[in-house]
Amino acid sequence: MKLSASAQELIARFPLGFVATVTPGGSPSVSPKGTFLVLDDETVAFGEIRSPQTVTNLTHRPELEVNFVDPFTRKGVRLRTGAVFVRRGTEEFATLLPRWETVWGDLAQRINIIVKLPVESVSLLTTPLYDDGATEDEMIALFKRKYAEIYP
């Protein structure tokens, strides 16, 4: 499934994705991953740095969902996908790694596995305030004030 230009832009601007997997014992597990990149209009990926439980979960069951949210507009996307591991030492890893080096510099050297996610479905996320008539500009102003109170 293709990612819209706005979904690609959101992921590029806010690359922190919340990855939902299932443990081998059947329990839900959510873990934030901050190294997401859009590889093309049908594929996103993250660099696995220190996520042994996520790797274990995806090895057992490769299906997952990931959410990306703009914290100011309170709009986002939910992707349903399956994981494809690209391991360090492979030709594909060597080809892909420079994309992470461009964005994250030396941090990219700590990537153990690039986890490619061919997107199977995309759904939009919005806050209920939009149902009540809030505009995007109002949401941005509201959350700028809230964050300024937290981080003066």
Image (spheres, rainbow, N blue to C red):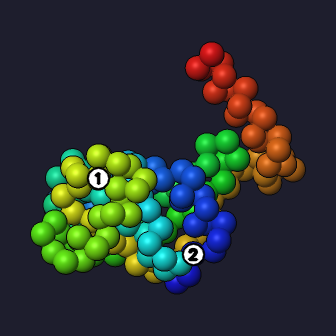
Secondary element at image label 2: loop
Which residue is disc 2 drawn over?
3
Locate residue 57 relative to residue 4 in the image: left or right. Answer: left
Could you tell me which residue is drawn at 33 percent across and 63 percent down?
98
Horizontal and vertical percent position of residue 150 = 59, 20
Residue 121 versus residue 131: which sits nearer the camera? 121
Q: Nearer the viewer, mark 1 or mark 2?
A: 1
Locate residue 16 relative to residue 94 in the image: left or right. Answer: right
Could you tell me which residue is drawn at 37 percent across and 72 percent down?
117
Which residue is disc 1 drawn over?
108
Q: Is residue 79 above or below residue 2?
A: above
- Location of residue 58 (image quadrant): bottom left
Number of residues whose C-alpha sits closer than 10 Å to that of mark 2, classed few (under 14), some (14–19) or many (20 or more): many
C-alpha span from label 1 to label 2: 25 Å
- Amino acid at circle 1: Ala
Could you tell me which residue is drawn at 54 percent across and 59 percent down?
11
- Amino acid at circle 2: Leu
Horizontal and vertical percent position of residue 32 = 38, 48
